[in-house]
Image (spheres, rainbow, N blue to C red):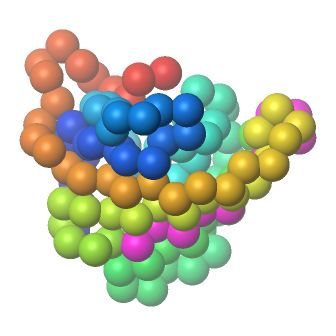
Amino acid sequence: MTSPGEWELSGVPGSKAPVRECVADLKTLAQFEHRTKNCTAKTLSDHGNSTIIQYTCHGADFGRTQIDVLTPRSLRISTQGISDGLPFNYVLQARRVGDCAKSASSARH
């Protein structure tokens, strides 16, 4: 089972180096593209190590994400949808690297 903490994300659009974020709620990884927006999510399927989540945000933004648990500390996040009127489609590799710093209480927003 995966757990909250400091996660290193590779494949983030616009970033050449991996990005580290404190993730308090793993559900935020499902809507990574819209992590700063208020969205409503629905789990479409949850089969062992693979979960598919569909979400809609205020306005016309939406997404569909598949999260595959490779190990308890490693995830593959495939996400696609519409953000600010434009399509997106990418895959993130997420690796839990430790606990969050004491001053960080949630994902960067």
Which quadrant of the view contains residue 93? bottom left
Q: Which residues are magenta?
A: 58-68
Check the image and report above or below for 58 versus 66: above
Magenta highlight on residue 60 = yes
- Quick one: 68 or 41, which is closer to the camera? 68
Given the current orientation, which residue lies at the most extreme bottom position? Answer: 47
Q: Locate the N terminus and report the quarter of the image it occupies.
A: bottom left
Q: Is residue 19 above or below residue 46?
A: above
Q: Residue at x 55, y 32 (%)?
A: 14
Outermost residue, top direction?
103
Q: Is residue 21 magenta?
A: no
Residue 95 image point, x, y percent: 24, 53
Q: Is residue 50 above or below residue 36?
A: below
Where is residue 31? Give x, y as percent.
Answer: 57, 47
Residue 44 place in picture, x, y as percent: 63, 74
Image coordinates of residue 71 in percent, x first then y, are 21, 72
**Total residue callouts:** 0
Q: Residue at x 17, y 30 (%)?
A: 100
- Residue 2: name its quadrant: bottom left
Q: Is residue 23 visible?
A: no
Is residue 20 visible in the rendered image? The answer is yes
Q: Write the residue at 81% across / 49% down.
A: 87
Query: Is 9 left or right of 30, judged from the image as shown?
Result: left
**Front-most of residues 2 and 14:** 14
Locate residue 1 relative to residue 106 in the image: left or right.
left
Residue at (35% x, 35% y) in the render: 17
Query: What secondary structure is the stretch in magenta mostly built from?
Result: strand
